[in-house]
Image (cartoon, helix red, strand yellow):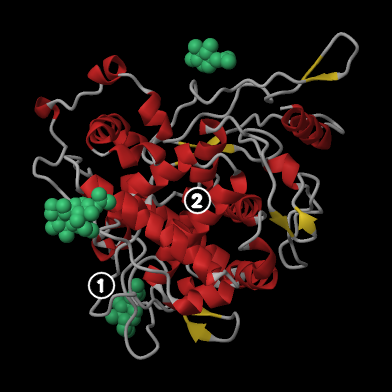
């Protein structure tokens, strides 16, 4: 506990040379599923201009350059948070209303190719021809410059225009409430939803220069949203540990950068909290930013006083998608009574008493909830090339996969009905 407080103190000190700076203009990142064709048209206008300005190549080059330090390492979350923000800020110079939508891919996990996000008016579908050149969507027929001159490509993972199943929301919910350590959560996310989605789209999206495909920004906005949910759900807003570039990761570490996309030596500790220090956005389905910088206030002697403002019960966030939150939790709560093995996957749901669940009972009259039993499907395994490209230990990847399958078996053997 003392150690945790010390970490919070250090984090606060890091940004308090001038003190944490609260944003006065907050933008909201919306679900990609909620966008209209005209929203997509606006996005296309911005990304086309960024493309003409050479920004796609610049970001792809940087992602490639820092790749080995920002995957399989703790910098995974803070780097991508800052990197996507940088791109969004450039877009806002072209259109001040531009924000990166997040793509909650769990909603499409069963048959990803049918996602409305992959329609012609949006991201477009699979690539065509031997090169897998993308001809539809907001980046249709683009030629890119990094790492060489080539058409933007997509190669769906399943063949015949299909994408192998992604990762169900229930697994992400379980990670968010189960993982008490950031490094565990980071590994679970990298080995599941992060990899599965990149591999599923394939082509440029499945490479070290994935930022060539605008999908990258939407996917990483979602990963960022999940990290923020975990930070709040666990009451560990400032937790940063695990493998760093030089030994154990620390909040004082510089966010990886290169000459093309640089953050001026900014420290990881400065981007931990949404709503401060230039991280001026929030999500339409994740905890709101705190109204003041958490954990930091001055005592009578002007020293930093540490008051943790969050606790795990208060900030309970069980679902990866708030739209389904109540229904999903009621179903899982019931399933816990049927399959005791589920308790380890949903420790916070297990703490909720039956009376609390009464109010969450699904109401037939509300509709929108699948009537028939809909069994979950297993996600696709991550392929060997992907594991190798990241230098992951195959046994660790396999362990996370088996764990996911066990969760699915348990839910499948209960009366639980998946909303997706
Ligand atoms: C891309 O080019 C193909 C072939 O010329 C054309 O059919 C398609 O409409 C183009 N797509 C876009 C988005 O302009
Ligand atoms: C945590 O939050 C709950 C709900 O707001 C509150 O009842 C409880 O007292 C809090 N616990 C602590 C230790 O602050
Ligand atoms: C889940 O159970 C159903 C039958 O209840 C079965 O058809 C389906 O294949 C199972 N799914 C998995 C992933 O085991
Ligand atoms: C699910 O049910 C099947 C069929 O009854 C059984 O073989 C399997 O062991 C069960 N899986 C789990 C994880 O309980």
In the rendered structure, the answer to whether residue 213 lies left or right of residue 9 reads left
Q: Residue at x 35, y 91 (%)?
A: 130
- Asked whether residue 329 appears in the rendered view, the answer is yes
Q: Residue at x 58, y 69 (%)?
A: 56
- Asked whether residue 376 appears in the rendered view, the answer is no
Residue 202 against residue 354 in the figure, above or below: below
Badge 2 or badge 1: first in the primary sequence: 1
Q: Position of residue 14 (x, y in %)?
A: 82, 37
Kindly report the distance in space between the C-alpha atoms of the residues bearing marks 2 and 1.
Answer: 23 Å
Query: What residue did someone put label 1 on?
Result: 162
Q: Secondary structure at mark 1?
A: loop
**Label 1 CB sits under 8 Å from any ligand 3 atom:** no
User: Which label sits on residue 223?
Assistant: 2
In the rendered structure, the answer to whether residue 54 lies left or right of residue 300 reads left
**Label 2 CB sits under 8 Å from any ligand 3 atom:** no
As drawn, the residue found furthest toward the bottom would be: 130
| Nearest to the observer: residue 319 or residue 79 | 319
Q: Quadrant of the N terminus?
A: top right
User: Which label sits on residue 204?
Assistant: none
In the rendered structure, the answer to whether residue 78 lies left or right of residue 30 reads right
């Amino acid at each position: 506990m003392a150690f945790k407080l010390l970490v919070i103190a250090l984090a606060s000190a890091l940004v308090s040379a001038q003190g944490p700076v609260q944003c006065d203009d907050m933008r909201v990142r919306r679900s990609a599923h909620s966008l209209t064709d005209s929203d997509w048209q606006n996005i296309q206008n911005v990304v086309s201009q960024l493309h003409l300005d050479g920004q796609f190549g610049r970001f792809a080059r940087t992602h490639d350059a820092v790749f080995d330090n920002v995957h399989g390492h703790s910098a995974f979350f803070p780097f991508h948070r800052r990197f996507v923000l940088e791109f969004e800020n450039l877009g806002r110079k072209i259109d001040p209303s531009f924000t990166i939508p997040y793509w909650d891919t769990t909603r499409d996990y069963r048959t990803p190719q049918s996602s409305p996000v992959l329609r012609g008016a949006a991201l477009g579908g699979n690539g065509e021809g031997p090169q897998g050149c993308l001809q539809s969507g907001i980046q249709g027929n683009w030629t890119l410059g990094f790492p060489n001159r080539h058409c933007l490509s997509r190669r769906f993972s399943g063949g015949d225009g299909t994408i192998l199943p992604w990762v169900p929301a229930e697994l992400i919910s379980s990670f968010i409430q189960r993982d008490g350590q950031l490094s565990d959560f980071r590994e679970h996310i990298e080995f599941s939803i992060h990899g599965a989605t990149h591999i599923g789209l394939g082509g440029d999206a499945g490479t070290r220069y994935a930022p060539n495909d605008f999908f990258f920004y939407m996917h990483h906005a979602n990963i960022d949203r999940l990290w923020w949910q975990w930070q709040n759900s666990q009451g560990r807003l400032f937790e940063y540990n695990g493998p760093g570039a030089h030994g154990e990761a620390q909040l004082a570490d510089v966010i990886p950068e290169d000459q093309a996309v640089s953050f001026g030596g900014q420290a990881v500790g400065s981007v931990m909290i949404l709503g401060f220090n230039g991280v001026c956005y929030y999500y339409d389905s994740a905890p709101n930013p705190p109204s003041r910088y958490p954990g930091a206030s001055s005592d009578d002697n002007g020293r930093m006083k540490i008051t943790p403002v969050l606790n795990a019960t208060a900030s309970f966030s069980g679902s990866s998608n708030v739209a389904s939150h109540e229904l999903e939790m009621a179903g899982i709560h019931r399933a816990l009574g049927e399959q005791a093995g589920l308790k380890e996957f949903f420790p916070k749901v297990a703490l909720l008493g039956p009376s609390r669940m009464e109010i969450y009972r699904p109401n037939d009259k509300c509709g929108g909830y699948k009537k028939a039993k809909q069994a979950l499907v297993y996600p696709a395994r991550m392929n060997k090339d992907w594991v190798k490209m990241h230098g992951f230990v195959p046994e660790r990847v396999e362990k996370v996969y088996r764990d996911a399958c066990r969760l699915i078996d348990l839910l499948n053997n209960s009366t639980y009905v998946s909303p997706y």
